[in-house]
Amino acid sequence: MPDTPAAARLPALLPETFDMLVYPVSRLSGTLTAQPSKNYTTRYLLAAALSQGQTRVVGVATSEDAEALLRCLHDWGAGIEHVGNDVVIQGFGARPRNGVTLNPGNAGAVARFLMAVAALTEETRFVTDYQGSLGRRPQADLLLALERLGARVQSEDGRLPIEIRGGTGLRGGPLEVSAEKSSQYASALMFLAPLLPGGLNLRLTGDIKSRAPLRQTLATLLAFGVRSQASEDLSRIDIPGGQTYRLARAEVPGDYPGSAAILAAAATLPGEVTVSNLRPDDLQGEREAVEVLREMGAYISRQGERITVRGGQPLRAVKRDGDTFTDAVQALTAAAASATGTTTWENIYTLRLKECDRISDTRRELEKLGLKAGETENSLTVTGGPVAGGVTVDGHGDHRMIMLLTLIGMRAERPIRITGAHHIRKSYPQFFAHLEGLGGRFEALPNTREE
């Protein structure tokens, strides 16, 4: 593996599949605009399709998740028109097309949101090309809730492929759903609720995970004219039935989870990086990553929607409940890997149920890089230290893992190779290009990961 030669600039169009060679760099500097939020893009596009009129969703994320959702909404009968970076959707309201097979790719939230809406159809079947990833993720808690509503469900032990038969017999009313493994089950039912005659009186049971995305769903419903009431702890959410989604224009905010990786990279290397389009009052839980980096010792300032990091300051370890910023844990782990002391992320069991096991798989890759890491069922620890590099690490088909390994590679002594790095497209297709614009150095290589 080469040690020092300058990497050629990345081509404008990367291969369909590739590994990425990450070269060490001495500093990062520059300004970029945060990509559109993956979570809000998903919510706005779905709400637009559930509308009876036309909605222009402004500044849509270009991720594979967004593409998967648009493909499924089109198959269900929504009109889809791309206008620059916007998408104009002619909704199907409460009448998605019957008898359709939907393939949400590897998009877990997309699959779950659509499964709940499928209860409006006489029959919808769900499949995936990613049986080893989305295909192994649990859906049973959501399917059980749909069965309680009167839908008929067929699945392989609560996993894809899944067939859902609903139709006109579903009335709504009181309904319990577990929030132990994911908040996405509840969000999915919240999108369905206003289109049922009786609405839903949701009761979320167990230790509720990831409350921030639930608040994003409630905010989306409100923006589209849907009334709801929720308890402060979100254990009770009441949404009256017989309502209509309607909004002419929805503007997608900047993405905090992806931007957390840029900010963490900037904190670990000398230089000054500014990221714009990050609203200070955003409901994305990963906004907390800014405060976590500050607590670690990073110099960060904010002016409105612009966040500036002056990197190269010594970082120190922290101990935090990671459930409030789940999708930033991997990026912040990269910062922790360069900090003095041992960082602990607690209450993060749900990370085991993502595209890969983001606790065990992260520990293994950190150890492969020569770092000390540990885990419990519910936590991850990493002790900061130097990274020699010169090794190949596994991206595990997980966009957040690829971000973590990239950030560590940029401060290693020698290059590292990340297998299956094309999976970054799931949430942040421009990730490597954005880092390259700040001073990162990369080389796309033939993919060695068996797909």
Image (cartoon, rainbow, N blue to C red):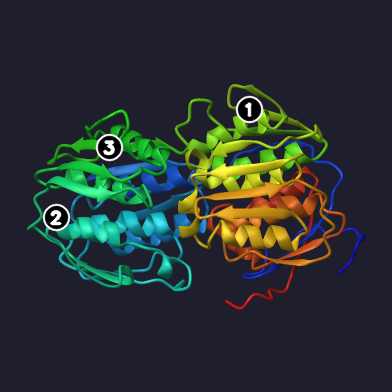
Crowd tier of the residue under label 1, counting other residues whose Cα lies within 10 Å: few below 14, some 14–19, many 20 or above: some
Q: Secondary structure at mark 2?
A: helix
Kindly report which numbered mark, 1 or 3, lies closer to the viewer in this rendering. 3
Given contact means CB atoms under 8 Å apart, are the residues at marks 2 and 1 in contact?
Answer: no
Name of the residue lying farthest toward the top = 303
Of 426 and 372, the residue lying toward us:
372
Determine whether 231 is above or below 14 in the image: above
- Residue at 34% from the left image edge and 37% from the top image edge: 220
Q: CA distance from mark 2 to mark 1?
A: 45 Å
Q: Earlier in the sequence, mark 2 or mark 1?
A: 2
Name of the residue lying farthest toward the bottom = 450
Residue corresponding to mark 1: 306
Residue corresponding to mark 2: 149
Q: CA distance from mark 1 to mark 3?
A: 34 Å
- Residue at 66% from the left image edge and 69% from the top image edge: 15
Residue 9 is left or right of residue 172, and the answer is right
Q: CA distance from mark 2 to mark 3?
A: 19 Å
Crowd tier of the residue under label 2, counting other residues whose Cα lies within 10 Å: few below 14, some 14–19, many 20 or above: many
Q: Secondary structure at mark 3?
A: loop
The three-letter code of the residue at mark 2 reads Leu
